[in-house]
Amino acid sequence: MRTELVSEPGDPGRPNEDFASVGLPASGQGGSLVVLDGVTPPSDGGGCLHSVPWFTARLGGALTELTVSLPDVPPAELLSRAIARTAGSHAATCDLSHPRTPQATVVLARWSSDSVDWLVLSDSVLLVESTDGTVTAVRDDRLDRLPLSALASHAVVDTTLRNKEGGFFTAAADPAVSSRAVTGSLPRGEVRALAALTDGAARWVERFGEGDWADCLALIRTEGARALVDRVRSLEHADAARVPPRRGKTHDDATIVHTDLPPA
């Protein structure tokens, strides 16, 4: 099995709020990948004493351990348990009811000799390549379905859209949010490769339109995940003077985990 992981902050002067891991059980059977994209909090800290990297490290670490140690538990239940464990580690010191308490997008994929299972919550993406070469993007498109006017104000987002019915959902402090994730499964013999991307890396397709998802996976496989991040950075620099500016940060943390699965 070949695996590649690249994660780069959008601003070298700020900590990377993404998390990425690959889990390989000691048994040598199967494996997993986890990618989180931390949500940058407002200037008031979002009611929590801890940073977003603190949160993503703990949530991502819990998810990585659980996907390996509990191979028969479905991904949504794994996310629920990981959120509960992480919330318990700072509930006594922080206001976890604040709408901007630390939170993250989630991509989780796990494979065994029998199946490949996955979960996607919010705007990171999982690419699933079938053995016939077809590439499917597994996405949670709730943010895409919201009007731009609704996303113009952080206050509006926090009070009416974030982790609310009719809005969008992220992993924060409520384990029940796991039921909102996009989940799926395929027989192991039908999947050749997986790639998880935070939206900072997925910009190559979603923001700049340089190719489709199949092109994106082909670029990662032939030139490497670092090449995709480098191309995104070049496009961001060229786009910085665009008027009017595009929605979102000029540069965002960019993370990619790519794995070519061994033959079933």
Image (tube, helix red, strand yellow):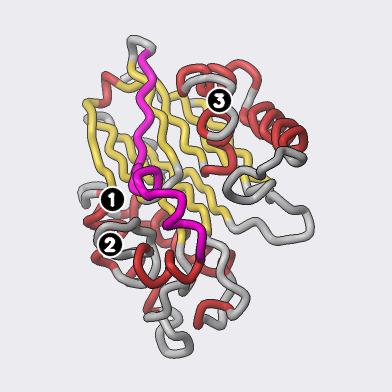
Q: CA distance from mark 2 to mark 3?
A: 31 Å
| Image quarter of residue 81 | bottom left
Q: How dense is the environment of label 2, judged by Cα within 10 Å: few (below 14), some, or many (20 and up)?
A: some
Mark 2 or 3, nearer chain start: 2
Judge whether residue 210 is colored magenta.
Answer: no
Location of residue 77 (image quadrant): bottom left
Q: Secondary structure at mark 1?
A: loop
Residue under the image location 56 percent in, 83 percent down: 49
**Residue at position x 43%, y 38% in the image:** 125
Q: Is residue 135 above or below residue 50?
A: above
Q: Which residue is found at the position 38% from the left and 39% from the top?
A: 31
Q: Which mark is residue 181?
A: 1
In front: mark 1 or mark 3? 3
Q: Which residues are magenta?
A: 134-153
Q: Nearer the viewer, residue 22 or 98?
A: 98
Label 3: how many residues lie within 10 Å, few (<14), some (14-19) or many (20+)? few
Real-space Cα distance between discs 1 and 3?
26 Å
Q: Using a 10 Å C-alpha cutoff, classify the residue at mark 1 as few (fewer than 14 neighbours), some (14 to 19) or many (20 or more).
A: many
Percent position (x, y) of residue 45?
Answer: 57, 78
Residue at which label 2 appears: 177
Q: Quadrant of the C terminus?
A: top left
Q: Within the magenta stretch, is there residue 137?
A: yes
Q: Which residue is mark 3?
A: 209
